[in-house]
Image: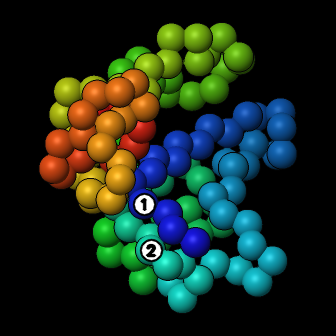
Amino acid sequence: MTFENNIVLGYSIPNYNAGHYPGLFYCESGIGPGQFTSRNHNIHLNVRNSGCPSTGFPDEFCVDPMFVNEPPAYMDEATFDNFDFTPATGSPVVDAGIQIPGLTTDYTGNIRPNPPSIGALE
């Protein structure tokens, strides 16, 4: 499995699943460094099940990606009405990614610089 330049941001819902954060990975035999073809330059926040890598993945971090209008917590579905996945000024994801062969534009068609930002948008 290849997992590069991703942002995984979880929210807990107090009345669902005992308020636990969502899991990051699920694999029948578990997930570890030897089960990835490549896993690097990812950001994880508020996830469980290996959500904050401590060993084996030195280029992964557990920090707030700082999106524009990122809600601090889940209240109801309207919480996400104005969520913008564009990195805010000062976001740690800007220019922190790794170049992926063949991936030259972001989700909206903007050219990816070298180094690109982590996530779907520049």
Instruction: Please name the residue shown 30% across and 43% down the image.
Output: 104
User: Compared with residue 80, is residue 42 higher up or lower down, i.e. above or below?
Assistant: below
- Point out the image quarter for the C terminus: top left
Q: Residue 72 at what x, y percent from top left?
A: 49, 27
Residue at the far front in the pictured view: 102
Q: How many marks?
A: 2
- Please indicate whether residue 87 sits to the left or right of residue 69 in the image: left
SS for callout 1: strand
**Residue at 75%, 43% in the rendered image:** 19
Q: Which mark is residue 43?
A: none
Residue denoted by label 1: 4
| Circle nearer the N terminus (2, 1) | 1
* Image-based side of 60 in relation to 91, left or right: right
- Callout 2: few (<14), some (14-19), or many (20+) C-alpha neighbours within 10 Å? few
Type of amino acid at the residue the image marks with label 1: Glu
Q: Is residue 119 visible?
A: yes
Q: Position of residue 30 (x, y in %)?
A: 71, 80
Q: Is residue 62 above or below residue 74?
A: below
Instruction: Name the residue located 61 percent from the left edge and 16 percent from the top edge.
Output: 79
In front: 30, or 54? 30
Dot 1 alpha-carbon crowd within 10 angstroms: few under 14, some 14 to 19, many 20 or more: many
Which disc is residue 38 wearing?
Answer: 2
